[in-house]
Amino acid sequence: KSNSISSNPSASEDDLQITEGTILGDHHVVEAFLGEGGFGLVTRCRDTKNNKTVAIKVNKSDPEILLQAKLEIFILEQLRRLDPDRCNIVEWNDYFLDGQRICLNFELLDQSLWDYIGDRNNQGLPMRELRPILHQLANALFHLGSVGIVHADLKPGNIMVLNHSESPVKVKLIDFGLACPASAVIPGDRVGTIGYCAPEVMLGIPYHEAIDMWSLGLVAVELATGVPLYPGEDDYDVLKFIIETQGQLPDHLLESGLYTDCYFIEDNYNKQRPENGQTLFVRLIKEMLALDANLRITPSEVLKHPFFHPGLSRRTPCTDMNSTGGQNLCSLSSNHRLGGQNSRGKEPGNKGKQIISAFIPDSHYRNSCSMTTVVFAYCTFIYIYAK
């Protein structure tokens, strides 16, 4: 999860021809590499004019990245109206050019929340630590909203701890590379990081500042448990997890989404959303393992269970557990974490559109989940939705 990289130049660094000792602009000496991304690199530099150490975001000279850097500068100029310390937002000093590259100069912070959680062996934070962090992040979002800015990429990697040895921990929101004015949001514009995007972003529905609150909710779960609530390799995974935990998305959202057809198909058969094989399998196992013997499913009921419905077996063929190396166990655990039924006692959405599930192999889920993720996230789900 760490965004940090080694001091040895990576392929990205070679492309930028930046190594330790490189001088950016005319007076910023590179001392270390702090992170990297599609935009370029973040370096720790010493300003030889005042001997201060700062963080320099070096953007590649690619035309699209240059345009994105200019848009980020526009956002950062708007944020100058805010007190960075009082508003829990990273302090931006200025920008300069290094050849054709745009370099952004920021205050140097300690470590990301990803690294901070990682230092705790991903065990999660106690409430006494979590509470002030969430309060500060909510404060940051409040002030961003006061100037009409959507961050659009809130995640643990974009939240920095000022000093990990302080108590309570102080944090600041960083990376406004995807931020935009709420008034300038483009419907269908894909922003954010998989696993932290709000449903309206994934579906291509016009969005606003509320997408940052969705992301903050997921960050809160991750801080408490040490693992993401909605792991996934793509938006399909995440949407499926959301639906299986919180129920079907409202019809008016699905109908207005530009990308709804990428994930859902119309269900015109009695307007019912059929359950997929994995969900039904989990439901069957839970009925088999009922603690009260009087409530346990009987053999005759097992034989009539919808898990064995012929139509279902054609869509999602049964797989031999022994021949899959345990991959179905991960799929089972993942679905058990999500539950075939939410804690309010209602089945997930049962009409309108159904999420496409017929041709997704079990290995797809195996690669996007782990037993640790399942245990922690499932416990968190129970805690949240059982209220």
Image (tube, grey):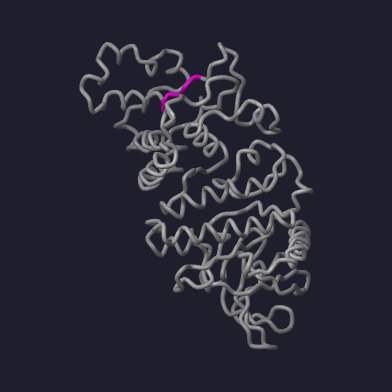
Place residue 346 in its image quadrant. Answer: top left
Residue 4, position as x, y percentages in the image: 52, 66
Residue 306, position as x, y percentages in the image: 39, 16
Place residue 142 in its image quadrant. Answer: bottom right
Q: Is residue 175 left or right of residue 303?
A: right
Residue 362 among those drawn in magenta:
no
Q: Is residue 262 left or right of residue 121?
A: right
Point 51% across, 30% down: residue? 247
Decide if residue 387 is in sight here: yes
Q: Is residue 319 left or right of residue 271?
A: left
Point 30% across, 23% down: residue? 287
Quadrant, the C terminus: top left
Q: Nearer the viewer, residue 65 or 252?
A: 252
Residue 218, position as x, y percentages in the image: 52, 48
For the magenta stretch, what is the residue range?
274-279
Decide if residue 5 is in sight here: no
Place residue 24 in its image quadrant. Answer: bottom right
Residue 276 among those drawn in magenta:
yes
Vertical arrangement, residue 199 with respect to residue 22, above or below: above
Residue 301, position as x, y percentages in the image: 30, 13
- In the rendered image, the residue lying farthest to the left is 293
